[in-house]
Image: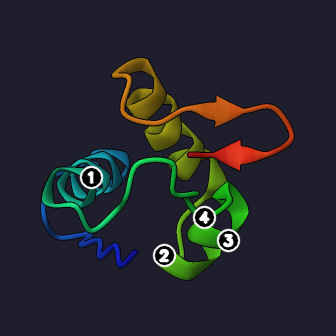
Amino acid sequence: MQIHISSSDGVPIYLQIVNQVKYHVASGRLAAGAELPPIRVLAERLLVNPSTVARAYRELETAGIVEKRRTAGTY
């Protein structure tokens, strides 16, 4: 899963992550039940604070798009 963020976009980074994950799910590029990268891994890849990725994942979980499984990751 490729996520690209832009600091000059004017959209908060966590929302950019949320929107792109939603797009990947809707387009079928991210299959149901597929595991998302761990928070720290994605944060390192995007060069952002892990709390930013955690907030995006929380938003996605609240919206019912992803499921967080204890000690197993986010799917």
Q: Position of residue 72 (x, y in %)?
A: 80, 45
Residue identified by numbered label 3:
41
Residue type indicated by callout 2: Leu
Residue type indicated by callout 3: Val
Q: First in sequence, mark 2 or 4: give its number.
A: 4
| Mark 2 vs mark 1, CA separation in Å | 19 Å
Q: Residue at x 86, y 40 (%)?
A: 71
Residue identified by numbered label 2:
46
Q: Are marks 3 and 4 in contact (CB under 8 Å)?
A: yes
Residue identified by numbered label 4:
37
Q: State whether residue 36 is above or below residue 19.
A: below
Q: Secondary structure at mark 1?
A: helix
Q: Residue at x 33, y 22 (%)?
A: 63
Q: Secondary structure at mark 3?
A: helix
Q: First in sequence, mark 3 or 1: give its number.
A: 1
Q: Are marks 1 and 4 in contact (CB under 8 Å)?
A: no
Q: Position of residue 19 (x, y in %)?
A: 22, 49
Q: Secondary structure at mark 2?
A: helix
Q: Residue at x 72, y 33 (%)?
A: 69
Residue identified by numbered label 1:
25
Q: First in sequence, mark 3 or 2: give its number.
A: 3
- Which of pointers 1 and 4 indicates the residue nearer the eye? 1
Q: Are marks 3 and 2 in contact (CB under 8 Å)?
A: no
Q: Residue at x 22, y 61 (%)?
A: 28
Residue 5 relative to residue 58: left or right: left
Q: Position of residue 40 (x, y in %)?
A: 71, 63
- Which of pointers 3 and 4 indicates the residue nearer the eye? 4
Q: State whether residue 36 is above or below residue 7.
A: above
Q: Are marks 2 and 1 in contact (CB under 8 Å)?
A: no
* Mark 1 surroundings within 10 Å by alpha-carbon count, few (fewer than 14), some (14 through 19), many (20 or more): some
